[in-house]
Image (cartoon, rainbow, N blue to C red):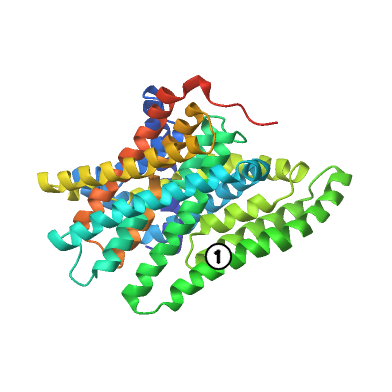
Amino acid sequence: MSNLQLAVHFLFQIAVILLFCQVVGRIGRLFGQPQVVSEMIAGVLLGPSLLGLFFPELFGRLFPAETLRVLFPISQLGLAAYMFVVGMEFRMDIVRERLGSAVAVSVAGMLTPFVLGGLLGWYFHRHTQLFPPKTSLLEAVIFLGASMCITAFPMLARIIHFKQLAGTVMGTVALGAGAIDDAAAWCLLAVVLASFDGDFSYALKNILGGLAYVSLVLLVIRPLLERWARGVKARGSLADGEFVFCLGLLALGAWFTDAIGLHAVFGAFIMGAAMPRGLVTEALRERIQPLTVALLLPLFFTYSGLNTQIGLLDSGYLWAMAGLIMLAAVGGKGVACWLAARATGISNREALGIGTLMNARGLMELIIINIGLQRGIITPALFATLVIMAVVTTLMASPLFEWLVGRHASRPAS
């Protein structure tokens, strides 16, 4: 396929993806699911789990392997741009006021699922064939523990936006805790990959690089941006060149955290959080958000779905293992985060909402387990069980939230 044919075919793919996501979204709304969850499901349905299974020839024509070289970078751009917007909506003032709650929820949301996941990793490694022989016991324990720790950070952000929880105690504590949990999970993954490759310099670069990036952005770049923003406010508008400059910062942040082994979402999110509030963030949000949400994010969800094969779960034994993983996932994340939020003085309804939101795994889970599968750390069968856990915990988040919290969700703080 020539470059011109590739470009033309990509335009056709975009049309199919967007229209299909809208159809699934309309169906999903009947069951109380936000558009973001429908887009995740649409991506899985367009992949080998459904379309490729029943219509392999159509699937091959629609998504030939060479077109994924185009779809992947565009999908990553959409994800980074959206997390940049989420960072701009992040309320640092509420995090400071509720720092104890955010840290407690984060620790509970990491420690409990990691212990339960680690125990399952030990059991699976010793008594099943779900890990390849070359995966050591320690690698199995850490990898499955990290998989349980993960939160659907981009999806969490979109659900919070969909339910108008941005700026609330519930939404901000969940986002803060989710960001910390996911960063920790990626650091744990770095340790596993380092052990697998016999090179621990990778893990060191991952962890120290992440800390250095956060310090640089929040302690150096943010004050400089605030000084620049005073001039923007005096003029009353954000110039086109200044808009491009902010996009450049977004791209640099996403590139750096991806280059050191953390995901690009963290670089974009932190850079967004550093943007001066007021006219600058309002102008950036107005220009970036509509196209990102309508066009680019569905491409990200579809790309991830193309790598997911639920059909590998083909025996009662594997479904039983999936059930064990589900119990550990829900108990370790949802229940632990709810109890931690309650212990720090958050009301029961808000604590239930935080626990429900934190329990969703979404496509960050799919990303981390895809890495594990590609590197040979886990078998396709274990991959399939973890996919089921990711999909089910995400599907249950919105209906469970409405049932437990519903119209009593807190209003944005002033």
Residue 41, given in percent of the width and then of the height, sits at 35, 39
113 vs 164, nearest the viewer: 113
Q: Residue at x 63, y 30 (%)?
A: 412
Residue 303, given in percent of the width and then of the height, sits at 39, 51
Task: Name the side, left or right, on which 107 lies relative to 102.
Answer: left
Label 1: which residue? 210
148 vs 58, nearest the viewer: 148
Crowd class of label 1 (few under 14; some 14 to 19; many from 20; radius 10 Å): many
Task: Name the side, left or right, on which 118 lies relative to 12.
Answer: left
Residue 379, given in percent of the width and then of the height, sits at 21, 61
Q: Residue at x 27, y 50 (%)?
A: 386
Task: Name the side, left or right, on which 231 lies relative to 398.
Answer: right
In the displayed structure, 41 sits above or below 194; it is: above
Residue 105, given in percent of the width and then of the height, sits at 48, 44
Q: Residue at x 46, y 58 (%)?
A: 184
Badge 1 amino acid: Gly
